[in-house]
Amino acid sequence: MQRVKHNWLNLTLAHTALIAYTIIALFPVVVILVNSFKTRKAIFREPLALPNSETFSLVGYETVLKQGDYFGYFQNSLIVTVGSLFFILLFGAMAAFALSEYRFRGNTLMGLYLAIGIMIPIRLGTVAILQFMVAAGLVNTLTALILVYTASGLPLSVFILSEFMRQVSADLKDAGRIDGLSEYRIFFQLVLPLVRPALATVAVFNMIPIWNDLWFPLILAPGEDTKTLTLGSQVFIGQFVTDWNAVLSGLSLAILPVMILYVIFSKQLIRGITSGAVK
């Protein structure tokens, strides 16, 4: 009875902490969404108040949709984010499988070499990256952004996935080999389905920085046809005047895809983070 009461108390505290964390995390998002439907004066006079008949305004959304190619920016961000995540998960999972499954000379050193990318920010090599993209003729292309984000996301991907793949039963893989499965079929049909929580964790950790990044789109793809959503929203921010209605409206529209993808991956994300922590 005492143990049941203790578990119930822990569950209640966990739920309370989760609710409090959700409120704190969503508060800035709610403030942005609420103010995007208000007039400029109302944004500064009563930033926490809900819009009413006097303060309600859609001028920000009208400005965003009329000025610039917002849907083009949105499409570019979606292509870059989805493409980068695809290659990060594919190549990261393949490298992690090789490091965790096969024993060869230099295995540990190779893992440490790949992990160095977690400690060294890729932005330190911006000049060299720009020179390489210019020489390859990839400036002002979405391919350049996908390559950079893939390279920056692979170290963390390999580090996380290799730990999960070491936990996959060796008997299961040996049974597949006995049945005549190739190493590729073992990887795609047996191993990957078992590490889906880890894949979702890697996807979420890389998705948000890629979607919100301004540095590399500004350096590598500043052209009108290749602007991402974050870079395209900077048109409303000036040195002396900032259109806050348009900025808040653009941010509100930019938040929606990330929230949708987060909801899709959230179940697997929580399972991946807590894997092995609760017995």
Image (tube, rainbow, N blue to C red):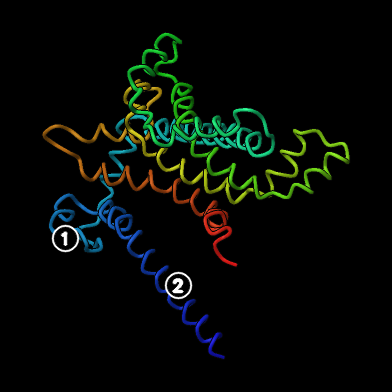
* Residue 103 in picture, x, y percent from top left: 68, 34
Q: Amino acid at mark 2?
A: Ala
Residue at the top extreme, as displayed: 135
In this rendering, the answer to whether 25 lies above or below 240 is below
Residue located at (83% from left, 39% from top): 177
Secondary structure beneath disc 1?
loop
Q: Is residue 139 left or right of residue 186?
A: left
Quadrant of the rendering where the N terminus is positioned: bottom right
Residue closest to the eye, 243 or 259: 259
Residue located at (27% from left, 57% from top): 31
In this rendering, the answer to whether 43 lies above or below 9 is above
Q: Marks 2 and 1, Cα distance to the nearest angstrom?
A: 34 Å
* Residue 242 in picture, x, y percent from top left: 17, 38
In this rendering, the answer to whether 207 lies above or below 109 is below
Q: Is residue 207 left or right of residue 110?
A: left
Residue wearing tag 1 = 46
Q: Earlier in the sequence, mark 2 or mark 1?
A: 2
In this rendering, the answer to whether 221 lies above or below 179 is above
Residue wearing tag 2 = 14
Decide: few, some or many residues near mark 2? Use Cα within 10 Å; few <14, some 14-19, many ≥20.
few
Residue at the front extreme, as displayed: 105
* Residue 142 in picture, x, y percent from top left: 46, 24
* Residue 271 in picture, x, y percent from top left: 57, 58
Residue closest to the eye, 216 or 41: 216
Q: Amino acid at mark 1?
A: Glu
Residue at the right extreme, as displayed: 179
**Number of the label disc, if any, that sits on residue 187:** none
Quadrant of the rendering where the C terminus is positioned: bottom right
Residue located at (23% from left, 62% from top): 53
Residue closest to the eye, 64 or 191: 191
